[in-house]
């Protein structure tokens, strides 16, 4: 039986799903499929945000807890009550996804829930996930085995007895210990008592596979002092789970070469992106690939033109053959035309016989999503000037119509219009949408901007500088300021900001690359000087070196 197919029996079906140790990218394809068809989602608090994004908007989530246990409302069922929630939903004929941290096969409570389903004849399936004991060491740069095939032992410190500690302590196996931060030293002591040498290397990793991950290298005998010296303990967060790997493969010299995740150029950096989520999607993905945590804050809002008649006449002109070309200078322009098309019951077929130009890759992608493949995208600079470089002059022999439809913002510059007229074209310059300053972000975001809570901010235009400062205040002195070009940098400086990074080309992706290069150089300098690698927000305000990439 296909578990995702519609269920025609009285009972529903349950998918027990492993969500992995924390990185959303570690969900399996099968897990994503199951989540997309779920009627009810019951998830561990630690992975609720990871799995919920793949579920339908109308999915029922009886457990609304998040990873922050303090935010769990009174009266919400505890995880031990999930068996009742699962069974109740399944008896009602629902498709239930029960998502757990790591792998469901290692969760004793989930085993009880599976037995309950089996006892009532409820169809269920198991979608394995990456266990924390395996995934976290991989992200920490600690391989568990080598070519000699060393034994690997997994220990849950909560349930390990004296016999377990003595057996592993007396062996030379790699030991992977699941414990808590404030219990690491006790676990190390148990292994030493069992026979391991105090100078045996170990690593301790907290928040593994997430951008909050931190790993410390020590020995069984020194781990308590190392964590104390790092000011990790004592701490109110001492109860958070950690994975400790004990054995020669966790030695510092080896991890220095294999620590691929924490050595990403922007690892853990909170980067402010003053664009809407739709505009910033690919840019945020790029920042994530560098280890950053992007935070999108819209600085402009888009509204319809005050007088829609001009736009309505232009769209009708597209259908009646008034134009040879239509030029899109932004994703918002594509959206405005598309919405007008939908209003009139039109679709992409209305572009038949009309040449379509896009100012850059993101605008071109928006057109393709609409069903239109642009005929012209700048081969060089992605701007109005770049578009004009490639735009053909009007030729009365080859061009039956000499008119261009240019839907754009009310505050757009005249560069493109003037350039097209010089090339011999007539231009219908139409206000397709208005840009207004967005509403201020939430108070906590404003405080983070002004208080140094962000490590960097990417300014992609002069207007993003003006609007962000206007709605949220000036970024703190410790925040790295990255600008897309000289004009944007000048505006930032006029607002009292010192520019650390400037893109070599007017491209948001080149800007992100430049910030990553800056972060990598900063990391290398710290390592070379023997200093700890910190994020900009972790240091005190002070003079900053002006660096342009």
Image: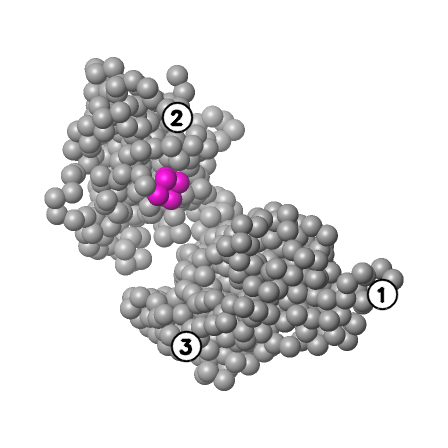
Near mark 3 (Cα within 10 A), the count class, few <14, some 14-19 or many ≥20, is some
Tell me the distance, in whole angstroms, between the alpha carbons under discs 3 and 2.
49 Å
Whether the magenta-drawn stretch holds residue 56 is answered as yes
Q: Residue at x 19, y 28 (%)?
A: 88
Which range is magenta? 53-57
Near mark 1 (Cα within 10 A), the count class, few <14, some 14-19 or many ≥20, is few
Q: Kindly give the residue lying farthest to the right in the view shown.
A: 397
Q: Which residue is mark 1?
A: 396
Near mark 2 (Cα within 10 A), the count class, few <14, some 14-19 or many ≥20, is some
Residue 256: x percent and y percent? 48, 49
Of badges 2 and 1, nearer the viewer stands 1
The residue tagged with tag 2: helix, strand or loop? Answer: loop
The quarter of the rendered structure image containing the N terminus is top left
Residue 131: x percent and y percent? 36, 33
Nearer the observer, 359 or 533 = 359
The residue tagged with tag 1: helix, strand or loop? Answer: loop
Can residue 264 be spotted in the picture? no
Nearer the observer, 231 or 52 = 52
Residue 376 found in image quarter: bottom right
Q: Tell me whether the residue at label 3 lies in contact with that at label 2, contact meaning CB atoms closer than 8 angstroms.
A: no
Q: Which residue is mark 2?
A: 4
């Amino acid at each position: 039986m296909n578990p995702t197919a519609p269920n025609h029996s009285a009972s529903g079906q349950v998918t027990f799903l492993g969500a992995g140790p924390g990185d959303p990218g570690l969900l399996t394809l099968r897990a994503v499929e199951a989540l997309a068809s779920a009627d009810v989602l019951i998830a561990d608090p630690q992975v609720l945000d990871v799995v919920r994004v793949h579920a339908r908007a109308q999915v029922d989530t009886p457990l609304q807890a998040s990873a922050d246990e303090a935010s769990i409302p009174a009266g919400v069922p505890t995880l031990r009550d999930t068996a009742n929630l699962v069974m109740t939903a399944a008896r009602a004929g629902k498709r239930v996804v029960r998502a757990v941290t790591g792998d469901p096969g290692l969760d004793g409570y989930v085993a009880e829930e599976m037995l309950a389903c089996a006892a009532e004849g409820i169809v269920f399936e198991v979608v394995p996930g990456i266990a924390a004991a395996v995934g976290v060491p991989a992200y920490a740069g600690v391989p568990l085995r080598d070519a000699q095939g060393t034994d690997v032992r997994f220990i849950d410190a909560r349930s390990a007895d004296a016999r377990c500690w003595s057996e592993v302590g007396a062996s030379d196996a790699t030991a992977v210990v699941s414990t808590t931060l404030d219990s690491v030293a006790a676990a190390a002591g148990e292994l030493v008592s069992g026979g391991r040498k105090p100078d045996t290397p170990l690593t301790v990793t907290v928040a593994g596979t997430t951008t909050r991950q931190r790993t410390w290298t020590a020995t069984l005998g020194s781990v308590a002092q190392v964590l104390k010296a790092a000011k990790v303990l004592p701490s109110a967060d001492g109860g958070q789970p950690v994975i400790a790997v004990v054995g020669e493969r966790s030695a510092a010299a080896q991890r220095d070469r294999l620590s691929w995740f924490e050595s990403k150029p922007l690892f853990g950096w909170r980067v402010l992106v003053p664009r809407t989520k739709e505009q910033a999607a690919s840019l945020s993905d790029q920042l994530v690939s560098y280890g950053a945590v992007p935070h999108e804050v819209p600085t402009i809002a888009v509204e319809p033109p005050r007088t829609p008649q001009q736009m309505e006449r232009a769209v009708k002109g597209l259908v009646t053959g008034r134009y040879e070309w239509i030029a899109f200078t932004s994703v918002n322009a594509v959206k405005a035309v598309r919405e007008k098309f939908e209003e009139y019951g039109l679709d992409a077929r209305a572009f038949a016989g009309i040449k379509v130009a896009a100012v850059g890759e993101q605008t071109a992608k928006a057109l393709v999503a609409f069903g239109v493949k642009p005929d012209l995208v700048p081969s060089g600079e992605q701007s109005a000037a770049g578009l004009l470089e490639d735009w053909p002059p009007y030729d009365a022999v080859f061009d039956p119509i000499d008119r261009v439809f240019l839907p754009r913002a009310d505050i757009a510059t005249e560069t493109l219009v003037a350039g097209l007229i010089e090339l011999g074209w007539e231009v219908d310059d139409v206000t397709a949408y208005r840009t207004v300053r967005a509403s201020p972000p939430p108070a906590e975001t404003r405080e983070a901007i002004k208080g140094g809570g962000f490590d960097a901010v990417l300014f992609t235009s002069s207007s993003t500088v003006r609007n962000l400062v206007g709605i949220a205040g000036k970024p703190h002195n410790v925040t790295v300021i990255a600008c897309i070009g000289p004009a944007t940098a000048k505006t930032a400086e006029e607002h009292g900001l010192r520019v650390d990074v400037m893109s070599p080309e007017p491209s948001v992706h080149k800007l992100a690359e430049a910030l990553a290069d800056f972060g990598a150089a900063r990391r290398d300098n710290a390592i070379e000087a023997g200093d700890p690698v910190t994020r900009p927000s972790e240091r005190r305000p002070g003079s900053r070196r002006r660096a342009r990439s």
